[in-house]
Image (spheres, rainbow, N blue to C red):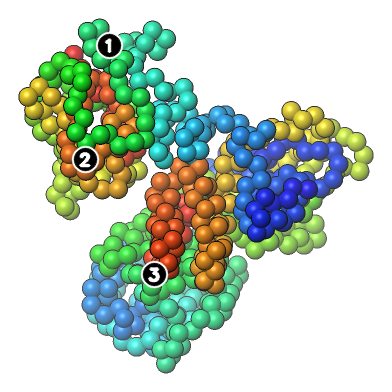
């Protein structure tokens, strides 16, 4: 019987010197079994109905929301909540038969805008509705739409972002509920980096809808992805590691930088969220490997396992990663092109994060240096659109201007995508 | 222990590190020992260093010819005539094909007269064959006096005669270029947009018809097509 989730590993450098510490990058690829059944949905839609959403924004948000509700089947459960000054449930969580569908669409149609952007209240509300219905046999996802910075109940911007990030990450870690975020309008109004990090921490995606008319297609894009989920939760486990993991990234289908993983009783456990139909995921671990105590040609670097839980129990696929030791220059110079390319993609993403940080601090010299390195990288990766955005930024800086949040947001989205050669 | 070459960083990295852990500066370039310029499925552009699939004939980033694909003309070593779906080029046109402009990134001159006018080209006698795109080998016969090249958009009611929607990932504009037969000459006009139309890798200016000859390589976005006689 084929594996539910198969695992493939590769090192950027098969050989390492026999002495001293050495950095090697391990690629871990998880691939779902072919033709697996997609899971029913446990979907939450969380809409910003603050006063800034008035007009075409709200009207298009309603249309987009209704578009998704109309595609739900009697296998799916969904809830719709809104937030402004406080939060409320518009459609309570229920299985979507025809009568529920009609009533739900009517409820969404009647939404009005007013008040502040109390996002934390919104998150609490939707998690309260959706979490009791989660299980390994359904896909639990929240799609959040917002056009502005989060505020408190009085409308003052609440930039203590860590509490939002922690809340969403905790819900994912503890209950397996993922969160995708959609920023609407100009990134001058919402903080694109914050919405991206919010989604990253909860194993979701960040999407940008520059115009209200783009909302339907943006909602549909994310809904299609969520709808194709075949495994609700997967975990990577690394055991018997002969070294230390310094950094851990997701690089396929898009990029995410994880907090440095911690070892617990000799095991590193990394929850990686849902797996979509026929969509492999690839991760990179930067590992400082140790020299062997005695001269040997080969040794075990680590054991890697991909684990999924279902009502039938735990499914586990394992792979041993071997490391070869050599003093031969030719062997030591061998590189795995596939891993090197993904490493370049990961470095490109790191440069994006550095650029955002430099832009926030206003350090123009730093921004110029990062832009130069990042442009070189995007050119090498053949990312034409991303390079153009960076050139715009360079021109802006050269002419004494400031990098716009919109350019940064577009660059972030372009950088998130991984261009994988066939 | 490799030291970061970035003067503002200088971080000491662990041996084996590819990119500086602190600033992302590359510690090992593609030309350094140990990293192949062309290996596996990747080939690096000699002009801009962008990574391309080995099947690409031109760089996706800058349009330059890629190693192993530079020859624009079918020859004995690489005869196009052996391709079952691409007929041989008439020997009479071969000299002209050999004189196809060398790859260059400078724009096609605005008012340069065609020094070696080729045979008269009329609708139905010419076709474009995809050399780089999602469906390599697909052919488009130029059957009308004027044809729009672009990407279909039902909402905007744009239906190009040559729809390249299925050939790349959205780099072709909806109204990308116009091909026109006029007095026995075929011209291409870039209709605007950031992703340029190129003839033999040279970007052409907007809204100015530029002549196309048999054997020329014309690119729209990332799609590269060869102008061939329609036998």
| Cα distance between the residues tagged 2 and 3 | 32 Å
Chain hosting mark 2: B
Tell me which residue sits at (47%, 38%) in the image: B48
Pointers 1 and 3 within a single chain: no
Q: Position of residue A407 (x, y in %)?
A: 40, 62
Residue A299's place in the image compared with A137, above or below, is above
| Secondary structure of the residue carrying numbered label 2 | strand
Residue labelled with disc 2: B190
Q: Which residue is mark 1?
A: B95
Residue A51: which quarter of the image?
bottom left
Which residue is identified by label 3?
A187
Where residue A31 sits in the image (x, y, percent)?
Answer: 55, 44
Q: Disc 2 or disc 3, which is closer to the eye?
A: 2
Q: Residues within 10 Å of mark 3 (few under 14, many from 20)?
A: many
Please tell me if label 2 and label 3 are on a single chain. no
Query: What residue is shown at x 26% (from left), y 48% (from top)?
Result: B193
């Amino acid at each position: 019987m084929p594996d539910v989730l198969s695992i493939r590993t590769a090192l950027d450098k098969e050989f390492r010197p026999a002495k001293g510490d050495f950095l090697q990058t391990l690629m871990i690829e998880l691939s779902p079994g072919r033709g697996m059944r997609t899971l029913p949905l446990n979907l939450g839609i969380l809409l910003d109905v603050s006063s800034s959403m008035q007009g075409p924004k709200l009207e298009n948000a309603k249309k987009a929301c209704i578009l998704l509700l109309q595609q739900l089947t009697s296998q799916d459960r969904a809830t719709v909540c809104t937030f402004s000054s406080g939060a409320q449930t518009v459609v309570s969580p229920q299985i979507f038969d025809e009568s529920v569908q009609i009533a739900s669409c009517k409820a969404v149609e009647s939404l009005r805008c007013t008040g502040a952007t109390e996002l934390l209240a919104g998150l609490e509300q939707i998690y309260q509705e959706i979490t009791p219905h989660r299980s390994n046999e359904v896909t639990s996802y929240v799609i959040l739409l917002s056009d502005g910075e989060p505020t408190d109940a009085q409308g003052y911007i609440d930039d203590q972002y860590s509490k939002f990030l922690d809340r969403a990450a905790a819900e994912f870690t503890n209950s397996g509920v993922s969160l995708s975020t959609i920023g609407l309008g100009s990134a001058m109004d919402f903080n694109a980096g914050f919405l991206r990090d919010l989604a990253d921490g909860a194993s979701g995606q960040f999407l940008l809808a520059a115009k209200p008319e783009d909302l339907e297609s943006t909602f549909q894009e994310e809904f299609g992805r969520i709808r194709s989920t075949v495994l609700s939760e997967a975990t990577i486990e690394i055991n018997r590691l002969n070294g230390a993991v310094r950094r851990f990234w997701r690089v396929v289908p898009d990029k995410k930088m994880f907090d440095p993983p911690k070892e617990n009783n000799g095991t590193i456990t990394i929850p990686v969220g849902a797996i979509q139909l026929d969509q492999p995921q690839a991760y990179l671990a930067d590992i400082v490997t140790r020299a062997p105590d005695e001269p040997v040609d080969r040794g075990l670097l680590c054991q890697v396992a991909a684990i999924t839980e279902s009502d039938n129990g735990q499914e586990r696929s394992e792979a041993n990663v071997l490391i070869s030791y050599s003093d031969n220059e030719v062997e030591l110079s061998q590189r795995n092109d596939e891993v090197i390319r993904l490493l370049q993609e990961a470095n490109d993403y790191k440069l994006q994060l550095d650029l955002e940080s430099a832009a926030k601090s206003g350090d123009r010299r730093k921004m110029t240096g990062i832009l130069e390195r990042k442009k070189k990288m995007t050119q090498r990766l053949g990312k034409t659109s991303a390079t153009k955005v960076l050139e715009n930024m360079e021109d802006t800086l050269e002419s004494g201007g400031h990098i716009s949040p919109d350019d940064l947001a577009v660059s972030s989205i372009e950088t998130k995508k991984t261009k994988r050669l066939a | 222990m490799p030291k970061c070459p970035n003067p503002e960083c200088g971080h000491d990295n662990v041996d084996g590190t590819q990119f500086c852990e602190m600033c992302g500066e590359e510690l090992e370039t593609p030309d350094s020992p140990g990293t192949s310029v062309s290996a596996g499925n990747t080939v690096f552009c000699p002009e801009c260093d962008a990574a391309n699939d080995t099947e690409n004939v031109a760089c996706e980033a800058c349009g330059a010819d890629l190693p192993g694909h530079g020859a624009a003309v079918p020859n004995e070593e690489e005869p196009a005539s052996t391709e079952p779906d691409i007929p041989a080029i008439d020997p009479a046109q071969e000299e002209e094909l050999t004189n196809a402009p060398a790859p260059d990134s400078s724009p096609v001159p605005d008012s340069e007269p065609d020094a070696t006018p080729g045979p008269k080209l009329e609708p139905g006698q010419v076709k474009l064959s995809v050399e780089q795109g999602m469906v390599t080998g697909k052919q488009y016969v130029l059957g009308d006096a004027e044809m729009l090249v672009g990407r279909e958009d039902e909402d905007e009611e744009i239906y190009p005669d040559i729809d390249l929607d299925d050939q790349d990932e959205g780099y072709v504009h909806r109204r990308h270029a116009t091909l026109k037969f006029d007095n026995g000459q075929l011209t291409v006009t870039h209709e605007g947009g950031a992703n340029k139309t190129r003839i033999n890798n040279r970007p052409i200016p907007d809204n100015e018809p530029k002549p196309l000859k048999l054997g020329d390589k014309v690119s729209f976005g990332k799609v590269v097509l060869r102008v061939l006689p329609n036998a």
